[in-house]
């Protein structure tokens, strides 16, 4: 976990670890039996937690093939009744849905839709126990679901509502994630000015969170997409969100997606 945080922060002043206790990226698994054996022999809870952080790191670095690899490991070895739910299961389900909805859009393979829908269903089930912890996560997954279904108006509402909920509930890195995904969504819809605002907000959130490497990746993406002079010197803290509540409360209202 320490090594993962060092990679996200990109701080060369961190002291080097000589022998990490369980460096997942240095363990060479030959096949799935070896993976399960390593989990059982070491510490299943430890393996589960490190898998969560590896999945998060791959996702925020937009290493989507790597993210899929880690969520596939989780899906195969931990999505069973025999293994009890852990706190980190919440995050596995959250990233499972984000990753599989993405691959459904990329490949059109129904199996990804089924997995994403199941993960979304679990988050929705758990959200009744804590609106504070789950509201922004649920809204972001609903945004990705609507995007996958090509219901673009509902997707736009959910992205914005998720960002505001994450902001209000102080989930800084999830505010950053939702902002970047909204930027990607609006860019693919051809709304470049709106997209850039979300990307810049994501950068600011990642910088505050301490993930300088991720912020730099998005900055580079913006420059590649919009040109080297596109970055505003001081992005504002808050986005101008048209609606901040759940989309169901605004279905009857007209909305302009771009200024």
Image: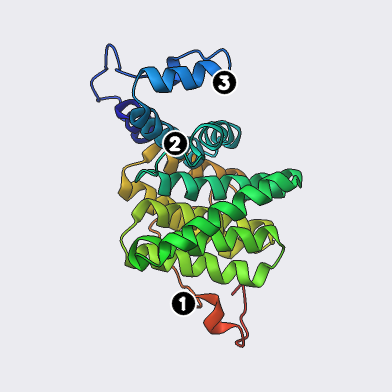
- Please say whether residue 236 is visible from this viewpoint: no
Vertical relation: 57 (above or below) 16: below
* Local SS, label 3: helix
Q: Which residue is mark 3?
A: 32
Element on which disc 2 rests: helix
Q: What residue is shown with label 2?
A: 57
Percent across and percent down for residue 248 are 55, 79
Nearer to me, 176 or 217: 176
Mark sitting earlier along the chain (2/1): 2
At 54% from the left and 59% from the top, the residue drawn is 121
The quadrant the C terminus occupies is bottom right
**187 left or right of 43 in image:** right
Q: Looking at the rendering, which quadrant does residue 66 occupy? A: top right
Name which residue lies at 62% across and 59% down: 145
Badge 1 is on which residue? 245
N-term mark: 1 or 3: 3
**Left or right of 148 on screen, residue 86:** left
Look at the image and tell me in which quarter the N terminus lies. top left
Q: Sort mark 2 into few (<14), some (14-19) or many (20+) by Cα contacts within 10 Å.
A: some
- In the rendering, at what x and y percent does residue 65 appear? 61, 33
Closer to us: 25 or 233 = 25
C-alpha gap between disc 2 and disc 3? 22 Å
């Amino acid at each position: 976990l320490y090594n993962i945080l060092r990679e996200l922060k990109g701080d060369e002043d961190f002291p080097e670890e000589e022998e990490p206790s369980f460096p997942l990226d240095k363990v060479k698994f030959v096949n799935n039996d070896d993976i399960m054996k390593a989990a059982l022999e070491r510490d299943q809870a430890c393996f589960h937690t490190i898998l969560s952080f590896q999945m998060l790191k791959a996702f925020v670095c937009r290493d989507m093939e790597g993210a899929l690899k880690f969520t596939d490991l989780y899906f195969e070895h931990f999505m069973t009744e025999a293994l009890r739910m852990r706190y980190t299961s919440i995050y596995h389900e959250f990233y499972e849905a984000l990753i599989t909805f993405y691959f459904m859009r990329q490949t059109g393979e129904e199996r990804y839709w089924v997995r994403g829908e199941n993960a979304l269903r679990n988050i929705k089930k758990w959200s009744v126990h804590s609106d504070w912890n789950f509201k922004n996560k649920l809204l972001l997954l609903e945004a990705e679901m609507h995007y996958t279904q090509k219901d673009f108006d509902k997707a736009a509402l959910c992205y914005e509502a998720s960002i505001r909920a994450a902001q209000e509930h102080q989930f800084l890195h999830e505010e950053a994630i939702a902002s970047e995904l909204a930027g990607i969504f609006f860019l693919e819809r051809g709304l470049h000015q709106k997209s850039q605002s979300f990307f810049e907000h994501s950068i600011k959130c990642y910088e505050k969170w301490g993930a300088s490497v991720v912020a730099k990746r998005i900055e580079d993406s913006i420059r590649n997409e919009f040109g080297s002079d596109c970055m505003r010197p001081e992005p504002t803290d808050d986005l101008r969100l048209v609606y901040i509540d759940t989309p169901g409360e605004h279905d009857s209202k007209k909305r302009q997606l771009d200024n």
